[in-house]
Image: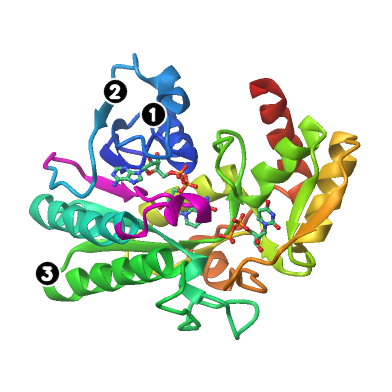
């Protein structure tokens, strides 16, 4: 593939750093923009000296001009404790950040991919979730800053596309895990693995019957590249692993795989927590010829090895 100049916002985060790795490995020139709110320079330390990699410490809420051909917009805290820490900031990052990236795409003719989320489906009444489902989101709940911020970002993408012909790509990412998740992230996979490795109680919120479909990060990166490389298809498209597990099943799997002596405890359920989530990936299979390859057990093993090395 021809080498491109690529901007990755949120490139020092968990997913963004893996994306930067892949783009550099493919021979592209990468500008990584990040304000290091939840990301870290450690995630990209191995890239900093690379001649085709540039790090820019900056807030995506500030307009930014650089002549690029591809923009991946990932800047936004993704774990519930982080995005609820300063909810107004989360909305601003989603909305102002998206406007800035779409204006940049409009000015340069770049293709822009938005990292949207399965959270646009809210607490879904349709199961599994297809892209045609409009969702069940409570705009005034504590998750609203993220869910509605991401929904508004999708609206902006499609309005810039219709009104100005901006070349957009929208993917809806389902729960993704893997090496480089932040230790203080608060998401379920990193929490459970860290608790198991430290011999602490495994904290299941509620009775553990809620479900998620968990995707290993390498599969997501493959899906992102496939979507960005595809002509004539803007999305939105689900990128996730359709394997569905209850949170209790995940807790037991992590305990078994780590050989931990940790006990499962039940804490109060989280308000407005979506009860079930499972990706329908028919559209991604048909249009992108993409599907995830890494089963949960295999991805968890790699993630456990990573957390063992950082502890
Ligand atoms: P993350 O928190 O590790 O990464 C987000 C990155 O964005 C961090 O490096 C952070 O410092 C940066 N950032 C936050 N606000 C910023 C701002 N105002 N300006 C510049 N940079 C800013 O999370 P992640 O899991 O890597 O998620 C990456 C993207 O993918 C996010 O947009 C998230 O909403 C989306 N997504 C992730 C998942 C998942 O399960 N990991 C699921 C759905 C969607
Ligand atoms: N969860 C849990 N214990 C934890 C962290 C999360 O039981 O220590 C639950 C959470 O309530 C939710 C699911 O795991 O039902 C996934 O949570 P996460 O924050 O990883 O992602 P999201 O809710 O955004 O899908």
Labels 3 & 1 near each other (Cβ < 8 A): no
Crowding at dot 3, Cα within 10 Å, few <14 / some 14-19 / many 20+, comes out as few
Labels 2 & 1 near each other (Cβ < 8 A): yes
Q: Earlier in the sequence, mark 2 or mark 1?
A: 1
The residue located at (32%, 69%) in the rendering is 154
Q: Is residue 55 above or below residue 262?
A: above
Q: Earlier in the sequence, mark 2 or mark 3?
A: 2
Q: Which residue occupies the foreground of this view, 246 or 221?
A: 246
Q: Which residue is mark 2?
A: 52
Q: Is residue 273 above or below residue 267?
A: below
Crowding at dot 1, Cα within 10 Å, few <14 / some 14-19 / many 20+, comes out as some
Crowding at dot 2, Cα within 10 Å, few <14 / some 14-19 / many 20+, comes out as some
The image quadrant where one finds the C terminus is: top right
The image quadrant where one finds the N terminus is: top left
Indicate if the residue with disc 1 has its beta carbon within 8 Å of ligand 1: no
Any magenta on residue 66? Answer: yes
Q: Is residue 36 above or below residue 71?
A: above
Is any atom of residue 163 visible in this view? Answer: yes
Magenta range is 65-88
Q: Where does ligand 2 appear, by image quarter?
A: bottom right
- Is 50 positioned to the left or the right of 14 in the image? left
Indicate if the residue with disc 3 has its beta carbon within 8 Å of ligand 1: no
Residue 24 image label: 1
Q: CA distance from mark 2 to mark 1?
A: 7 Å
As helix, strand or loop, the secondary structure at mark 1 comes to helix
The residue located at (76%, 42%) in the rendering is 298
Q: Which residue is mark 3?
A: 164
- Is 177 positioned to the left or the right of 109 in the image? right
């Amino acid at each position: 593939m021809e080498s491109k100049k690529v901007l990755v916002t949120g490139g020092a985060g968990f997913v963004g750093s893996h994306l930067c790795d892949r783009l550099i490995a493919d021979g592209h020139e990468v500008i990584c923009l990040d304000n290091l709110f939840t990301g870290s320079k450690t995630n990209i330390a191995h890239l900093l000296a690379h001649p085709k990699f540039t790090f820019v410490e900056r807030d995506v809420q500030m307009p930014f001009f650089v002549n690029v051909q591809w923009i991946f917009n990932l800047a936004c805290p993704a774990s519930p404790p982080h995005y609820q820490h300063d909810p107004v900031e989360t909305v601003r990052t989603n909305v102002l950040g998206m406007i800035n990236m779409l204006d940049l795409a409009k000015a340069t003719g770049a293709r822009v991919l938005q990292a949207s989320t399965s959270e646009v489906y809210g607490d879904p009444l349709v199961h599994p979730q297809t892209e045609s489902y409009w969702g069940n989101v409570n705009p005034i709940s504590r998750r609203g800053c993220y869910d509605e911020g991401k929904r508004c970002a999708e609206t902006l993408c499609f309005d810039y596309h219709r009104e100005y012909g901006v070349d957009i790509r929208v993917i809806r990412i389902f729960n993704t895990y893997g090496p480089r998740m932040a230790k203080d992230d608060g998401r379920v996979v990193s929490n459970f693995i860290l608790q198991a490795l430290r011999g602490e109680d495994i904290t299941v919120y509620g009775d553990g019957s809620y479900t998620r479909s968990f995707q290993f990060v390498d599969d997501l990166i493959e899906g992102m590249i496939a979507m960005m490389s595809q002509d004539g298809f803007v999305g939105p498209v689900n990128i996730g692993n359709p394997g569905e597990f209850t949170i209790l099943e995940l807790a037991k799997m992590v305990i078994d795989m780590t050989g931990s002596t940790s006990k499962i405890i039940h804490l109060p359920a989280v308000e407005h927590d979506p009860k079930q989530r499972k990706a329908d990936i028919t559209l991604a299979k048909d249009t992108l010829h993409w599907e995830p390859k890494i089963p949960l057990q295999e991805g968890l093993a790699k993630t456990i090895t990573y957390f063992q090395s950082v502890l």
